[in-house]
Image (spheres, rainbow, N blue to C red):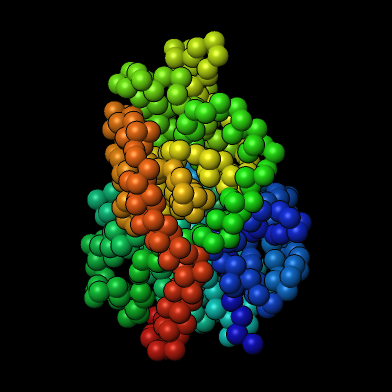
Amino acid sequence: MARVIIVSNRVPIPKSRGASAGGLTVALRDLLTPGTVWFGWSGRLSADPSLQPAIVEARGVTYATIDLKAETYRGFYVGFANGTLWPLLHFRLGLMQYRQEDYDDYLSVNRLFAESLRTMLQPDDTVWAHDYHLVPFARMLRQQGFRGPLGFFLHVPFVPPSMLEALPVGRELVADLCAYDLVGFQTEEHARDFRDCAQRLLGATVRGEWVRLNGRSMRAFADPIGIDAEGFHQEAQRAENDSLVKRVAGSLAGRALAIGVDRMDYSKGLPQRFEAYGRLFERHPEHRRQVHFLQICPRSREEVDEYRKLRIELDRLTGRINGRFSEFDWTPLRYSARAAPRSTLAGLYRIGRIGLVTPLRDGMNLVAKEFVAAQSDEDPGVLVLSQFAGAAQELTEALIINPFDPDAIADAMHHALIMPAPERKERHQALKEKVFRTTAQAYCARFMDALLSIKAQSIPRVAA
Ligand code: G6P
C-alpha cells in the first residue's frame, strides 16, 4: 500500500484525547489516517541513541522517533538550525552565527534521520519533510537508496541570493533543496527567491516553477498554509463560556482588548510592538484608560542566547510602559510568558477588539488567520498585520503596517479603536472569506496533488 511518511524535527504524538493540536498537526490532519507514519526526534537526549525508532501507534498513525546525542543536538538545533538558519531566513544577518562544527552536526542529524527512517521505508512510500531543520534530508535519503517521491515544505521565509551568500554553506543548502522533487513555500516571493538562488548561485536553469540542475528537475512553488477555519470558529464560539475567558472579559470593565499571541521570538517584533503601544497614548491620549493590551508569549528556545536577551528586554519594557502610563486603577499592559490552551486563545481572540500581529518577518503567521476565524460577524475585531508576515499577501483587508515603525502601529491601533462597525464588518467579511478558502485542508491537498503528479509524470527525479 502506498503510504505517506511525514518527517519533522518535532513529532506531535497525541498525548490525550482532549489535548489541543499544534499548527502542523492541524495542517496535516487529512493525512493522519491509518498507515501514515510520522517520523522525527523524540525530544529526548541519550548517550548512545539507537538507530531503531521507538514506535507509538495512535488512531492508526505510526509515530516513530529517535533520540539524539546531547552534543550533536546542540550543534544541530541550538547551533545551526536556530543560531544560523533561523536568523538568516528571518533577514537578521547580524544575529547569524556560523560554526563549521554546528553544520557538521546538522548534517549528521539529517544523516541519522535518513538511516533510521530507511529501516522502515517501503518502495511505494511518499515522503514529505518539514522545515529548516531538514534541508539536506532528501540527499541523505537518496544516498540510502530511496527512489520514491520526496517533498519538502519550508514553514519560514526564504531569502534572496545576496543574503544567502552570507552563509558560507549557502550554495550547499540550495543544492540540497534541489534534491527534493517538490519544495513548497508560504508565498510566491519566497518561492521566487529560492529559484533565483538556484539560478544565480548554482547556475540552475529555471523555467516557471521548475528548476533543472545536474540533469534532474524539481518544482518550487507557493502553497500558503492555513487553519481549520470552521473548527477554530466553533472553538471560539464555545470558548465564550470558558471560565478564564469570562474572567478576562469581566476584568476589562468595558475597555477594549488588544491581544497579541506569539512564541517569544525576536522575529515577532515584540519590543517594537510594546514601544508602539506606549506611542498610542502619546499620540492619541484619548485612549488612556480605554484599552488593555494582553500579550501572551510562551517562552521558547532558551538555550539560544538571543532568546534569553529578548526575555530580559520584554520584562524591562513592560515595567517601563506600565510605570509610565498606569493609573492606580488601570494597568495598560498585561504580559504573560506562559502558554495558554488553544481553546482559551480562541475565546480571547473573539473578545479582542484588536489583534496585533506585527512580526519583523514571518513565513505565514497563523495567529493572524486564527484571529479572523474567531471573530463574530456582528461585532468583529480589527486585525493589525505586518506587511512582512506571509499572511499579509492574502489578508489585504487587515490594517497593514510596517512593524519597524512604532508610530504607524500606534496609528493603526487608533484607527482600529475608532473604526465604525460597518467598516469593521466589511473588512472582516473579506478576510473571513479568504481564511475559510485557503484552509489547512486546501494546503495539504494542494501539496500532495503536486507531489503525486510529479511521480505520475515520472520526471527524472534522481540524477543519473
Ligand atoms: C516555528 C518553526 C517550527 C518549530 C516551531 C517551534 O514555527 O517553523 O519548525 O517547531 O517554531 O519551535 P521549536 O524550536 O520549539 O521547535
Determine whether, in the image, residue 108 is placed left or right of residue 1: left
* Residue 401: quadrant of the picture: top left
Q: Position of residue 180 (x, y in %)?
A: 43, 72
Observer-nearest of 321 and 314: 321
**The C terminus sits in image quarter:** bottom left
Observer-nearest of 219 and 344: 344
**The N terminus sits in image quarter:** bottom right
In the depicted structure, whether residue 108 falls above or below residue 141: above
User: Going 55% across and 78% down the picture, which residue do you hit?
Assistant: 126
Q: Position of residue 320 (x, y in %)?
A: 46, 15
User: Going 34% across and 31% down the picture, which residue do you hit?
Assistant: 414
User: Going 42% across and 57% down the picture, which residue do you hit?
Assistant: 432
Q: Is residue 70 visible?
A: yes
Q: Is residue 100 visible?
A: no
User: Going 35% across and 50% down the picture, which residue do you hit?
Assistant: 427
In the depicted structure, whether residue 386 falls above or below residue 24: above
Q: Position of residue 50 (x, y in %)?
A: 73, 61
Q: Position of residue 285 (x, y in %)?
A: 35, 18
Total residue callouts: 0
Q: Residue furthest top?
A: 328
* Residue 58: quadrant of the picture: bottom right
Determine whether, in the image, residue 438 is placed left or right of residue 244: left
Observer-nearest of 59 and 334: 334
In the depicted structure, whether residue 115 falls above or below residue 94: below
In the depicted structure, whether residue 138 falls above or below residue 460: above
